[in-house]
Amino acid sequence: MRRQGEVDASNWFSDVKLDPRSAEPLYQQIADMIMYKILHHVLPPGTKLPPERELAALFDVSRTTAINAYRLLERQGWVKTRVGSGTYVERHAVESNGNSGNKGNAGQMPWTELFAARPQSPLSTILRDLVAAPLAEDNIALAAGMADPATFPIESMQRLFAERAGTAAPIDFGHIPTEGYNPLRHAIATGLAAKGIAATADQVMTFSGSQNGLYLLARVMLEPGDYVVVEAPTFIGAVQVFQGAGARLLSLPVSEGLNLALLEDYLIRYRPKFFYINPTFHNPTGRVLSERERHDLIELAARYRLVIVEDDAYGELFYHHPPPLPLKALDSYGGVVYLNTFSKLLFPGLRIGYLAASPTLINRLAMEKQYIDLHTSNISQWLLHVYLESGQLPLHASRVRSIYKKRRDALAQALRHYCGADLSFSIPDGGFYLWCRIERPVTARDLLHEAIKGGVSFVPGDAFYTTPESGEREFRFCFTSHPETVLWEGARRIGDTLRRMTKARRPAHSAVAVQPII
Amino acid sequence: MRRQGEVDASNWFSDVKLDPRSAEPLYQQIADMIMYKILHHVLPPGTKLPPERELAALFDVSRTTAINAYRLLERQGWVKTRVGSGTYVERHAVESNGNSGNKGNAGQMPWTELFAARPQSPLSTILRDLVAAPLAEDNIALAAGMADPATFPIESMQRLFAERAGTAAPIDFGHIPTEGYNPLRHAIATGLAAKGIAATADQVMTFSGSQNGLYLLARVMLEPGDYVVVEAPTFIGAVQVFQGAGARLLSLPVSEGLNLALLEDYLIRYRPKFFYINPTFHNPTGRVLSERERHDLIELAARYRLVIVEDDAYGELFYHHPPPLPLKALDSYGGVVYLNTFSKLLFPGLRIGYLAASPTLINRLAMEKQYIDLHTSNISQWLLHVYLESGQLPLHASRVRSIYKKRRDALAQALRHYCGADLSFSIPDGGFYLWCRIERPVTARDLLHEAIKGGVSFVPGDAFYTTPESGEREFRFCFTSHPETVLWEGARRIGDTLRRMTKARRPAHSAVAVQPII
């Protein structure tokens, strides 16, 4: 007895029959046939399909088989069963009708729905925004940690390329080992000896920037749920990579010296995969770990076989005497991974970072890096190598040190002049940054919001912490990318903004409750 | 009653007591205390710990709590319970005794045990071996797919760098957007128009080689268990990346034209995330998809909203007339991702690949790329941009086309001369490769084994397949990296090897059964 509005479903399936000897179960065969007819518009969206009993009769199968066929189709999004009504072809099962005449009409692919679900770092866009943010004509950007482009030794490299390219073996611009361009690895190993690090070329690996090294370390060492110890505050780019790998972060405050008791507690309780530390001219605070602290840390780490990832991006940028030897120079147990970059000392556009570590680790990193980019740019590696060979680096380093020292002092003086007791900070012995604390009831985010209008920007402190509500009154200035006069003007703008905000003194910023998403 | 050999455990714990108000459960507190004492050598390796009953009495807790404490410790590797004997501190729980005087003695860290478990591609090392294998002095390497270093336009780039570096804004060597160096993106978009692809600069993204683009596509789109359709045979580097992301691969044979019925079957059954295809001068077979096939594929893909990842690495390397327009030029539904590289046309050491796709996809790729390397080498991007601007590329392309065409013909002629009916192949209209079939009962792996001794190498066919026992008699020659005389000598060596092997005619290579690992 056919009710009104129903069509005779038997026509739809008169041309097909099941194969009882197939390895594929009968419900799967039925589901496939229905899918095929949906895709070919024999069964357009919205079509009511026969009830299970009728479907079973059409194909001469049990009712369970018919139910299973519909269940499979529903799970795959082809049909929808409405209780008390029946089973219908989904409206969106086929989104196109095969009309390929609409050329140039983009945006028809549901791209965002195709992306893999990933743990998104809560900081996910900060780093990129800092790197890519277009700067207003008159904005004084004290945010991104960058060397001054005016110091980039582009001309030297240009001369060297012109002089030396003839001597290059063309094969050096073909495929090279994933671990790096060998002459560059040798040159880096030589440079490490001057820092007390005894590494052979096969204990050195180059990367497409130290970010690439951090990413690879995370890929090779971290599984979701693993623990990693980081300083608080710490470098954003590292935190993002660790969180992206699903790691849980344990914060070790840097404010009152190295807290080894807390670190040991973490080691016992959580067995972290590694401790990521920036011991020298720390980003963002400028702190330097003392020689005593370095020895104690290594002793503890050796006892627990703790891997230390030592980021030494700023070690060459000292403005008084050279800092203590890197942790890697004290490494008694082979557990320190020394990571460095030429982005701060030379320029970021080289995209060359490197690490010194056990060849076992380097082999594993190279196995992974081949998937990611085969190897780092030969052009960059070759140019850097001839630059290092030319012996110009020490001179360049001493030149930028003297420039940056003056800038550090200028910014500190200007901030004291324009901000007085509104801001507190200590003067770092090296590196790129002045870490400030706002001594007024104003958060760094609010200050940034206003400061950008006033034409100056910086990085608010909370960006460097992995725990909420940390660093709210702190922020980071980079003092290396502008000449002194600009730094004075930047400080003046900050001072003005801060004074205006503390005068206008709105009601204290109250915490906004988290709203459930419904 | 204390039995012989046991010590009074109560002394060990006389200095500690539990905190009943702590949020930490009692068994956890007990476990923490024992761990602490193991780490501080109060309880050296091998120490027999008190029986559960005694431990419970010592801390005045239930026996269950004591059992749970030991269970936790055992799970974390600190202790080991031997049935009928008792619980002992593990020998390897603490591998170092804090002696930091053994400086320089590396290899003490258990590095390999620290690496994350990952699905390892069965092909995992082939690609890297091909790229990095040291070549014997007299070996003729016809394996890696590389342009001839003698053709690399290093001198042109050197001149351009010398001429143009003065005009570069230093900021171009600082941090730039993750999506790529904008002038280069514009230049690439202009070049795409000549291929019938209408893309604006924001629909173009640059990568650290096209491998980097493939890796990012996999990161952004694939979750473990997802399906991806690939050609069989196909490019190894892509397969490795997809497998590394946990994808399941569906093979579409290229031998008898594009099998759209099988593709549609895959689409219905598996809803693959994308189809990775190399439609023009296919690696390794040289096949070109006809215009008709391209249209039919796009029509089917549009109907199913199938993402097509079109790898066009060889499209410019045609030796007769230009190939049909890329699939991207026919893209009616916005689902084609066009991927290309400058490695084949210029040189691999540039490490510049790019893709043209929806800005939605590019944004997501850039979000991911910032973790991996922030952005691609500016030096490489800047140099490539001035090179493209200089208008030298078309001339270079026509130069290498005429060189490579002669080499293709030379290798084909030499193989016919030296191998005769032992090998069959068809002559490709473009690209880098000659795909050969051994018409004798010799596998390509066995041939390679002998050929290397004879001083010539190639890639055995099975490396290009994802299914076992495919391509056993096939292999790939790259004809672009050596001059004709060397290709003739390579062919002679192959011919000799093959003749020697078919004469020596060992018993047919019998399949070795898979042995269970016990």
Image: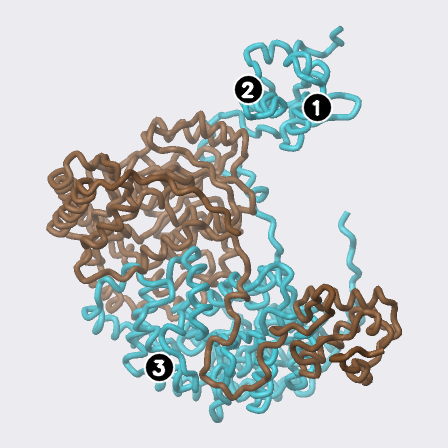
Chain colours: A cyan, B brown
Q: Residues within 10 Å of mark 1 (few under 14, many from 20)?
A: some
Residue at mark 1: chain: A
Residue tagged by mark 1? A67
Q: Give the label, 2 or 3, closer to the camera.
A: 2
Q: Is residue A446 above or below residue B356?
A: below
Report x, y in % for residue A376: 38, 63
Q: Give the label, 3 or 1, closer to the camera.
A: 1
Q: Amino acid at mark 2?
A: Arg
Q: Residue furthest top?
A: A1
Q: Residues within 10 Å of mark 3 (few under 14, many from 20)?
A: some
Residue A471 left/right relative to A363:
right
User: Residue visible at 66% across and 76% down?
Assistant: B46
Residue at mark 3: chain: A
First along the sequence among labels 1 and 2? 2
Residue tagged by mark 3? A190
User: Residue visible at 78% across and 55% down?
Assistant: A515
Residue A379 left/right relative to B482:
right
Secondary structure state at the residue bearing disc 1: helix
Asked whether residue A196 is in view, the answer is yes
Report x, y in % for residue A369: 43, 60
In the drawing, what numbered circle is on residue A21? Answer: 2
Secondary structure state at the residue bearing disc 2: loop
Q: Give the label, 1 or 2, closer to the camera.
A: 2
User: Residue visible at 75% across and 68% down?
Assistant: B70
